[in-house]
Image: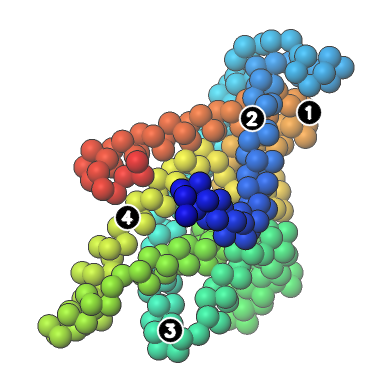
């Protein structure tokens, strides 16, 4: 069989895989590539009477609102601060859950637990906001009922900003731990059992096996996930900071991020140029952060770098 016929046969054999990739590819093109045609709006005074791209060129004026506002420090502090916490807490909880799931998998060979832990990742923030409200409602929330039964005073959770850094981190962990744990679990499953058997013969305890085998071999996955997370260091999960908090003004000091600020500005001013400028800024800074982080890692550990 000639090389041309082999390639043709191989292409036909892969048709089912191409079809499976179509929905994800279509989403990628529609959601990530088509909007790139609107980058020019970041440098224009958008006027739809002149067409989407017919607005007057205003240079970097649309970027000024991100830095000239009095809330600039607040939104950048919250955006970067929360993301740094998520970058630390996410791998810790994800790896812990993955190790636990792997133990269950080895003992019971069941995927029920994996499905249950992944479930929160599939729930929308609209549903999560109702769940959080059911827990924290000042009048009939489950948490306040428990506090009252214990002799304490009910807490007005949606009027006290100081509680929300912890609440938001917990909600983020609960929603993201499923996806994170599955990623790390796939790496753990790929570790050769010969390492564990040899360690067991040498008398290593379960914790020693985790510490000296599992965690070191998870290092490349952790680095990759961290680099990808750094790409979103100037982005925030809009559903987490806007919907879960029910857009309460009293919580602005701890929930105002770059994305929520841009959304509020868009709703109040209707300036699409400013919103495009914010998205452009986030993308460029995220790209530079990933490039820088990868370069640093490549310098100290080339085999763990993305490229």
The quarter of the picture where the C terminus appears is top left
Q: Going 17% across and 80% down the picture, which residue do you hit?
A: 198
Q: Residues within 10 Å of mark 3 (few under 14, many from 20)?
A: some
**Residues marked 2 and 1 touching at CB (< 8 Å):** no
Residue 131 horizontal/vertical position (percent): 69, 68
Can the viewer see residue 85? no
Verify CB contact (< 8 Å) between mark 3 and mark 2: no
Residue for badge 2: 36
The mark that comes first in sequence, 3 or 2, is 2
* Image vertical order of residue 261 relative to residue 81, above or below: above
> Is 8 left or right of 108, judged from the image as shown?
right
Q: Which residue is mark 4?
A: 220
Residue matched to label 3: 104
Mark 3 vs mark 2, CA separation in Å: 45 Å
Q: CA distance from mark 2 to mark 4?
A: 31 Å
Q: Nearest to the eye among marks 1 and 4: give it.
A: 4
- Which numbered disc covers residue 162? none
Q: How many marks?
A: 4
SS state under label 2: helix
- Estimate the spatial distance between the alpha carbons at disc 4 and disc 3, rounded to whole Å: 24 Å
């Amino acid at each position: 069989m000639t090389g041309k016929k082999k390639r043709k046969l191989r292409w036909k054999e892969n048709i089912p895989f191409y079809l499976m990739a179509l929905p994800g590819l279509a989403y990628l093109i529609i959601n990530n590539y088509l909007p790139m045609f609107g980058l020019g709006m970041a440098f224009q005074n958008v006027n739809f009477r002149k067409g989407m791209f017919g607005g007057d060129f205003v240079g970097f004026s649309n970027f000024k609102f991100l830095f000239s506002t009095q809330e600039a420090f607040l939104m950048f502090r919250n955006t970067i601060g929360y993301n740094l916490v998520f970058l630390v807490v996410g791998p810790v909880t994800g790896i812990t859950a993955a190790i636990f799931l792997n133990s269950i998998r080895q003992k019971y060979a069941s995927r029920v637990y994996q499905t249950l832990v992944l479930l929160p990742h599939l729930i929308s923030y609209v549903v999560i906001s109702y769940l959080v409200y059911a827990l924290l409602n000042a009048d009939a929330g489950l948490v306040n009922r428990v506090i009252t039964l214990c002799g304490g005073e009910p807490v007005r959770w949606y009027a006290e900003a100081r509680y929300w850094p912890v609440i938001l981190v917990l909600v983020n962990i609960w929603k993201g731990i499923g996806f994170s744990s599955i990623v790390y679990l796939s790496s753990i499953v790929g570790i050769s059992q010969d390492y564990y058997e040899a360690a067991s013969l040498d008398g290593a305890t379960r914790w020693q096996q985790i510490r000296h085998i599992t965690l070191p071999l998870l290092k490349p996955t952790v680095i990759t996930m961290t680099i990808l997370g750094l790409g979103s260091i100037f982005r925030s999960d809009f559903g987490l900071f806007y919907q879960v908090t029910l857009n309460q003004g009293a919580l602005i000091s701890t929930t105002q991020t770059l994305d929520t600020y841009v959304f509020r500005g868009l709703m109040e001013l209707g300036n699409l140029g400013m919103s495009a400028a914010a998205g452009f800024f986030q993308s460029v800074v995220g790209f530079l952060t990933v490039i820088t982080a990868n370069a640093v890692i490549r310098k100290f550990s080339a085999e763990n770098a993305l490229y």
